[in-house]
Image (cartoon, rainbow, N blue to C red):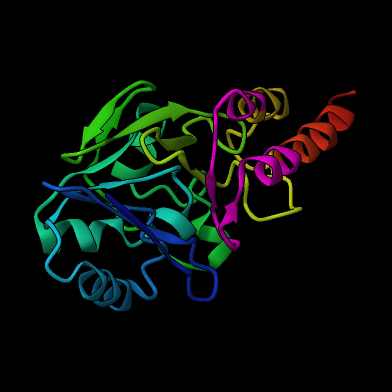
Amino acid sequence: MRVVRLPGIHHDASCVVVSGEQTSFVVDPGTSWYQSNVLERVETNLGERPAVAGILLTHRHYDTAGGACHLSEHWGVPVHIHRDGVAALAGGDLFTTWASRFNSDMPATEVTALDGGDMFDLGGGRIEALHSPGHTSDSTVFWIEEKGVLIAGDLIPRRGNPSRWDLPTGCLPDLLESVEMALDLEIDTLVPGHGDTIRGTAEIRAELEQHQEALTACVE
C-alpha cells in the first residue's frame, strides 16, 4: 500500500492518493480552481498503480470538495461524503460549503452517503471512515490501520493550528470529542488538512494533546 500527500495549491486542501494492490482512492481534491492540475498530478503520481475507484471527502467545504465533481466525471467514479454533507454538495450550496467565502460557485456534485465505520477495500488493506464532527457536522477522518495512517482533514488543519468550529454546522464540544477519539488511535503518520505530514507516535500524540488542551480551555 502507498499513501502520498500532494500539497494543495493556494487555498486547496492537501490531496491524498491511497493505492493498494487492487484499487486507489483520492481524498480531498481541493477547489475547482486547479482541478485540471490536480487531475494531472494524481494521474502522474499513480503511474502503473491501480486506477482510482472513488473519491473520499473529509467534509463539505469548497477548499476540500470543490474539485470532486470534475474528477468524478473524468474517472467515472463515485464521490463519498458523510450523509450530513450530501444535501449541501448535491445542491451546490454556497453557504455551508463556504464557497461564498472564496467568491466561487460550488459545483453541484452527485455524491454517495457514507457513515462512520464504513470500509473501502484497497486490496492488501482498507480505509475506514470515522465520523469526526466539530469542524462541520459531516467531518470524517480516514483511518488506515495497517499503516497507522490517519488522514485527518480539518480535524487537524496543520501543526499547531486548532480547527475552527465557528463556521456553519460547526460545534466546539463535538470537535473536542473528535480530537479525543483520535487520541485513542495508534497513529504513526498523521496527514493534516493543509499542513505538512506529522510523523512518529510520540510527536503525533503531543500534537493531539495540544489541540485537546486548547479546545478544552475554549469549552471551559
On screen, 38 above or below 155?
A: below
Residue 203 lies in the magenta-colored region: yes
Q: Nearer the viewer, residue 125 or 16?
A: 125
Q: Which residues are magenta?
A: 180-207
Q: Quadrant of residue 212?
A: top right
Q: Which residue is at 64% across, 28% downward?
A: 183
Q: Nearer the viewer, residue 92 or 6?
A: 6
Q: Which residue is at 70% across, 27% downward?
A: 176
The C terminus lies in quadrant:
top right
On screen, 147 above or below 177?
A: below
Report whether 156 appears left or right of 87.
right
Q: Position of residue 195 (x, y in %)?
A: 60, 61
On screen, 145 above or below 190?
A: above
Q: Nearer the viewer, residue 84 or 43?
A: 43
Q: Nearer the viewer, residue 43 or 38?
A: 43
Q: Position of residue 44 (x, y in %)?
A: 22, 76
On screen, 193 above or below 114?
A: below
Q: How many tags in the picture?
A: 0
Q: Position of residue 41 (x, y in %)?
A: 29, 75
Report whether 178 appears left or right of 209.
left
Residue 217 lies in the magenta-colored region: no
Q: Position of residue 214 (x, y in %)?
A: 84, 37
